[in-house]
Image: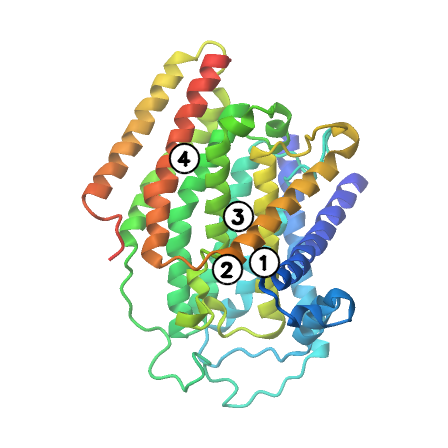
């Protein structure tokens, strides 16, 4: 348990270091860069022409089906990791291998069904 | 305590130097492959000073935040894009006998999870810019992450299955030469999916300049824009390092593994980085539907097949 917190303490320290690199860089940059904001400068650049209407335009999120599929598959995939470390340990062998094929079959059937339904082709 | 500080400094130094080195190599390799004269000019010999000149230009530029933008998110986005790649370097082993900053138990899992966070920086930038093209770019980034994260995770777990451990140094220790043919499909899937997650050409739909200007980064300038560019190169280093560790045997080479381990790791990383640059020069950009098709019709089934192959051989041999 000690080691556990120790390891993640180092991770937290590195997050602080990373924040320091970015924050320090930007702070030092403040001394070097000019700052003369004007109204024209602060308009949205977009494609070089004055923007028309709001910046957050409505658009159709075409990939929401992919998002569903991804969530379903990713939740399954997470369980692979703990299983991967023990599946070939003595005493498991064939049983876990059989289980893996059940697991893969579920995923493959799901993917084939999604493909058959035509949701995997971008419209 | 001192040991940890030294290791953190080394990680930060690697993070500062390696991406710039990849950037410099990209300048020169692309200049040679495409017969460009520009990048070969600054500083006379082979244009060695080009990167320095770019840096000087970036730090002198004004930090403009558009009035319509979501200020706080806009300013935070480059840090979110960059820092995760620094964190991944923490768990990447460069040599045998503990030449790794932290040997995390669930190392593969940590690396993949943290790498995914980097993509959120680009989505934040796309949303916060209050710019239609940036928003479209951000949505493309999200779609790409959604499709390519899955084959990447499957391929990585195939390597974890073969080694029987999630720790990255542990995986390299278990690595044998016959992994090369055995895990070849997984390795290719991992590398290609990683490229897509980094939005490197030919998977650069989110920043397609002929359609949406520069996607999520359109409104950025100066140092913040430079941070996004740095994140791209840091991402290349991280992807190449992870591919090396998971599929190419990390510090293991034909001879002197114990003494020259770190050199083998670096050599493999740079060969892969060269490939990444070569892809950029060689392939045209994939269209959005082709992108999705490649992921779901090819990479996911291939990675599932790799999982089956890994399982069967592992149980049969062990």
Q: Chain of mark 2?
A: B
Q: Nearer the viewer, mark 3 or mark 4?
A: 4
Q: Identify the mark nearer the N-term, 2 or 1.
A: 2
Question: Residue shown at 48%/81% (left/top)?
Answer: B67
Q: Residues within 10 Å of mark 2 (few under 14, many from 20)?
A: many
Between marks 2 and 4, how big is the CA–CA gap?
A: 27 Å
The answer to the question of whether label 2 and label 4 lie on touching residues, with beta carbons closer than 8 A, is no
Q: Is residue A87 visible?
A: no
Marks 3 and 4 belong to one chain? yes
Q: Nearer the viewer, residue B270 or A79?
A: B270
Circle 2 residue: B121
Q: Quadrant of residue B172?
A: top right
The answer to the question of whether label 2 and label 1 lie on touching residues, with beta carbons closer than 8 A, is yes
Q: Nearer the viewer, residue A9 or A111?
A: A111
Q: Which mark is drawn over residue B303?
A: 4
Q: Residues within 10 Å of mark 3 (few under 14, many from 20)?
A: many
Circle 3 residue: B115
**Numbered circles on residues, count:** 4
Q: Quadrant of residue B140?
A: bottom left
């Amino acid at each position: 348990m000690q080691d556990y917190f120790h390891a993640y303490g180092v991770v937290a320290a590195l997050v602080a270091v990373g924040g320091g690199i970015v924050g320090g860089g930007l702070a030092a940059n403040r001394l070097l860069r000019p700052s003369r904001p004007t109204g024209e400068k602060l308009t949205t650049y977009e494609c070089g022409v004055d923007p028309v209407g709001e910046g957050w335009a409505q658009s159709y999120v075409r990939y929401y089906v992919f998002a569903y599929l991804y969530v379903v598959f990713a939740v399954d995939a997470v369980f692979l990791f703990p299983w991967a470390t023990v599946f070939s340990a003595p005493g498991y062998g064939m049983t876990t291998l059989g289980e893996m094929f059940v697991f893969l079959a579920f995923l493959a059937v799901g993917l084939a069904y999604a493909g058959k339904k035509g949701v995997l082709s971008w419209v | 305590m001192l040991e940890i500080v030294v290791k953190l400094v080394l990680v930060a130094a690697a993070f500062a130097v390696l991406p710039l080195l990849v950037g410099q190599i990209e300048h020169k390799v692309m200049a040679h492959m495409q017969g460009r004269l520009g990048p070969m000019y600054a500083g006379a010999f082979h244009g060695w000073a080009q990167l320095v000149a770019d840096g000087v230009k970036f730090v002198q530029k004004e930090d403009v935040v558009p009035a319509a933008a979501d200020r706080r998110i806009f300013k935070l986005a480059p840090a979110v894009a960059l820092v995760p790649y620094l964190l991944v370097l923490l768990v990447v082993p460069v040599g045998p006998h503990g030449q790794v900053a932290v040997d995390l138990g669930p190392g593969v899992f940590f690396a993949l999870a943290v790498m995914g966070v980097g993509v959120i920086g680009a989505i934040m930038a796309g949303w916060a810019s209050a710019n239609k093209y940036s928003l479209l770019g951000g949505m493309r980034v999200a779609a790409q992450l959604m499709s390519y994260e899955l084959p990447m995770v499957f391929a990585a777990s195939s390597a974890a299955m073969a080694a029987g451990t999630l720790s990255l140094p542990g995986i390299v220790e278990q690595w044998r030469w016959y992994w090369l043919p055995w895990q070849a499909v997984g390795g290719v899937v991992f590398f290609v999916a990683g490229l897509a997650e980094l939005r490197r050409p030919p998977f650069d739909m989110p920043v397609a300049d002929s359609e949406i200007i520069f996607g999520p980064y359109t409104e950025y300038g100066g140092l913040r824009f430079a941070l996004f560019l740095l994140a791209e190169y840091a991402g290349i280093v991280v992807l190449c390092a992870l591919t090396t560790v998971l599929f190419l045997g990390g510090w293991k080479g034909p001879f002197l593994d114990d003494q020259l381990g770190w050199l083998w790791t670096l050599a493999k990383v740079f060969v892969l980085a060269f490939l990444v640059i070569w892809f950029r020069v060689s392939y045209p950009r994939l269209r959005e539907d082709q992108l999705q098709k490649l992921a779901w019709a090819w990479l996911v089934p291939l990675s599932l097949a790799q999982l089956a192959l890994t399982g069967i051989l592992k149980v049969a041999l062990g």
